[in-house]
Image: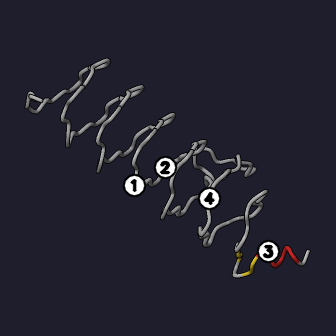
Amino acid sequence: MSLKVGPYDLRQSDISGAKWQEVRAEELVIDNVSLARTSINNVNMSAMKLNDVNMSDFQITDANMTGVSIKLANISQASIDHVYLIGTKFTNVVLPNEGEPQYKPDGQYEPTTFKSCNLSKSQFNACDLSNVTIDNCNIDGLRINGILISDLLKDQ
């Protein structure tokens, strides 16, 4: 592939509808740009950084996201389907505080749902699990504060 090489400095330009095919575009600086409704396929985005971005209705399919870090993000109403979470850590996952967007004074939020998930050998530490419902789940070996739940249920 023969490439035209050169630094292209686009400022105050409208390149809507442009097509990039077989393009090397590494180490770009994209600042204050709208990429709404852009389609990106078969692209190497390793070590890419996204800061202060609106990704509402963003869709990622068939992606290797090993080592991805998501911080200070609102992912309410997200759907995560058929995802490997080996070694994944969820830390400081909270509900909105007063004064923050989506805060509800009555505390009535849609529940976070785990359905048909294999969470075996997962660890929950210092979590608020109040009003959690566990239905139709395999709880073999499930311990809460060191107490085997199956033993408690046997006594019922």
Of 129 and 60, the residue lying toward us: 60
- Is 145 left or right of 11, judged from the image as shown? right
From the top left corner, tell me how far across and down residue 56 is, in percent.
Answer: 50, 36
- Mark 4–mark 3 Cα distance, whole angstroms, equals 18 Å
- Is 83 left or right of 1, judged from the image as shown? right
Count of numbered circles on the image:
4
Q: Which quadrant is home to the N terminus? A: top left
> Against 130, is 97 above or below?
above
The image quadrant that residue 81 belongs to is: top right
Q: Which quadrant is home to the C terminus? A: bottom right
Disc 2 vs disc 1: which is toward the camera? 1
Image disc number at residue 73:
2
* Mark toward the start of the polypeptide (4 vs 3): 4
Q: Which residue is mark 3?
A: 150
> Badge 3: few (under 14), some or many (20 or more) residues near its Cα, within 10 Å?
few
Give the amino acid at mark 2: Ala
From the top left corner, tell me how far across and down residue 149 is, in percent.
Answer: 77, 74
Disc 3 vs disc 2: which is toward the camera? 3
Kindly indicate whether the residue at mark 1 contacts the one at mark 3 (C-beta within 8 angstroms). Answer: no
Kindly indicate whether the residue at mark 1 contacts the one at mark 4 (C-beta within 8 angstroms). Answer: no
Image disc number at residue 118:
4
Q: Which residue is mark 1?
A: 66
* Mark toward the start of the polypeptide (4 vs 2): 2
The image quadrant that residue 21 belongs to is: top left
